Image (cartoon, rainbow, N blue to C red):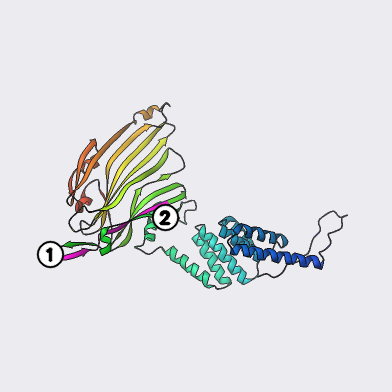
């Protein structure tokens, strides 16, 4: 820590006829040093009380007395960091690094800059700064922070919600250090749903000999993961993660898509209607997670004055009807076509032939351990027609129009 005030050489650049200012008297220098110390003490006291605004004001006033004091530059940078101003924290921290000759101070300032880099999502930069800090002087806090950062870079442990979140964010290319302009996302469990089978670690079934046994692979809990980010557009999407008795938490996929590049005529959005475990199978394979959502994708063309729309009602069924845990996805209803974007405005001649909408819906219900699909309104696509009939839930993955996601 720097002690006292440095009094350097004063170069007078005024008029050659004017007399240079008189050097401070001993009494003035002592008063200035005392004022500096009072400001530093006041700044540290305010910082200790988390009164960041007062601390910043006192440290900045102290720097007017001694502008090149690395210790106070470093403390000011750290208070800015605590206040959430990463740009100012980085600026003053780098000034402190440039001016200090004390290895202890250098290690502390490099660590502070590492925290700034880490909060900005720059893990590579943060790791470099933590290593420089340790090279200047070893410190257990820095060693622990570096170890945690390296562990994060290696990825979260499999079977955890953190790992499921990492997969959900990777689906959007989020937080990829190779993409400087990529999305910066957050992921959190917005809701967790527990099956009645969770308490026993699996459902209990009775075999032909009358012996009860637990199926540990059944879905036990579901989590709705909210992924939000900003960068190449705005992302706000909901992903499904499932915990089974054998594989821990696993990422299933996006159930609600939400994305826009920043223009209103190109977007994806959706809503979640319901998500809950239901006792549908009645065969000892455990309950079924039944999730329904609506999704809309729009792609407009101002030049042609048309907008392509794709609206779907999605059904997800997660179960262990075949012994192994899976999630099956199918579309219950859809509305697809091209519409006029701005009513009253002309439509391009070559786009008029595209106008029109096709709507259809299916009626889906459980029938014992089977799924019954019946025709509803409209004329379904060939893929949707393939769903019509009665199918064993265990064999849904073999049906055209069903996308099956196997789990561990």
Secondary structure of the residue carrying numbered label 2: strand
Residue in front for this viewpoint, 282 or 155: 282
Left or right, 303 with respect to 33, comes to left
Query: In the rendered view, does 394 fall on the left or right side of 125?
Result: left
**Point 40% across, 54% down: residue:** 169
Residue depicted at x 30% and y 63% = 247
Residue identified by numbered label 1: 210
Please identify the dominant SS of the magenta region.
strand
Viewer-nearest residue: 194 or 360: 194
Q: Where 365 falls versus 104 (above or below)?
A: above
The part of the chain drawn in magenta is 208-227
The quadrant in which the C terminus is found is bottom left
- Residue 187's tag is 2
Image side of residue 165 versus residue 2, left or right: left
Assess disc 2: are there few (<14), some (14-19) or many (≥20) residues with their C-alpha within 10 Å of its C-alpha: many
394 within the magenta span: no
| Label 1: element kind | loop
């Amino acid at each position: 820590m720097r002690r006292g005030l440095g009094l350097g050489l004063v170069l007078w650049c005024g008029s050659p006829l004017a007399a240079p200012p008189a050097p401070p008297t001993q009494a003035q220098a002592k008063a200035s040093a005392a004022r500096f110390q009072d400001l530093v003490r006041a700044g540290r006291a305010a910082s200790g009380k988390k009164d960041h605004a007062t601390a910043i004001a006192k440290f900045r006033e102290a720097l007017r007395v001694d502008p090149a004091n690395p210790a106070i530059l470093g403390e000011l940078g750290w208070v800015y960091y605590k206040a959430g101003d990463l740009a100012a924290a980085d600026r003053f921290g780098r000034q402190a690094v440039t001016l200090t000759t004390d290895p202890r101070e250098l290690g502390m300032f490099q660590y502070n800059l590492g925290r700034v880099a880490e909060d900005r999502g720059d893990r590579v930069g943060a790791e470099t700064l933590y290593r420089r800090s340790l090279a200047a002087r070893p410190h257990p806090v820095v060693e622990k922070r570096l170890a945690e950062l390296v562990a994060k870079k290696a990825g979260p442990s499999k079977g955890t919600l953190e790992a499921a979140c990492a997969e959900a964010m990777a689906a959007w290319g989020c937080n990829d250090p190779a993409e400087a302009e990529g999305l910066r996302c957050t992921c959190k469990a917005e809701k967790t749903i527990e099956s009645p089978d969770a308490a026993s670690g699996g459902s209990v079934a009775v075999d032909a000999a009358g012996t009860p046994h637990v199926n540990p692979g059944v879905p036990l809990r579901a989590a709705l993961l909210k992924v939000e980010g900003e960068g190449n557009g705005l992302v706000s999407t909901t992903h499904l993660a499932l915990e089974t008795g054998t594989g821990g938490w696993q990422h299933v996929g996006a159930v609600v898509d939400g994305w826009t590049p920043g223009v209103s005529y190109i977007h994806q959005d959706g809503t979640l209607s319901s998500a809950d475990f239901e006792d549908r199978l009645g065969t000892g394979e455990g309950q079924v997670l039944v999730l329904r959502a609506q999704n809309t994708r729009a792609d407009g063309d101002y030049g042609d004055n048309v907008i392509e729309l794709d609206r779907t009602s999605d059904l997800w069924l997660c179960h262990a009807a075949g012994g192994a845990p899976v999630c099956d996805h199918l579309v219950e209803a859809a509305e697809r076509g091209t519409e006029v974007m701005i009513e009253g405005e002309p439509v391009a001649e070559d786009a008029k032939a595209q106008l029109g909408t096709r709507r259809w819906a299916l009626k889906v219900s459980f029938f014992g351990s089977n799924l019954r699909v019946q025709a509803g309104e409209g004329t379904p696509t060939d893929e949707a027609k393939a769903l019509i009939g009665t199918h064993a839930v265990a064999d849904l993955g073999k049906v055209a129009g069903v996308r099956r996601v196997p789990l561990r």
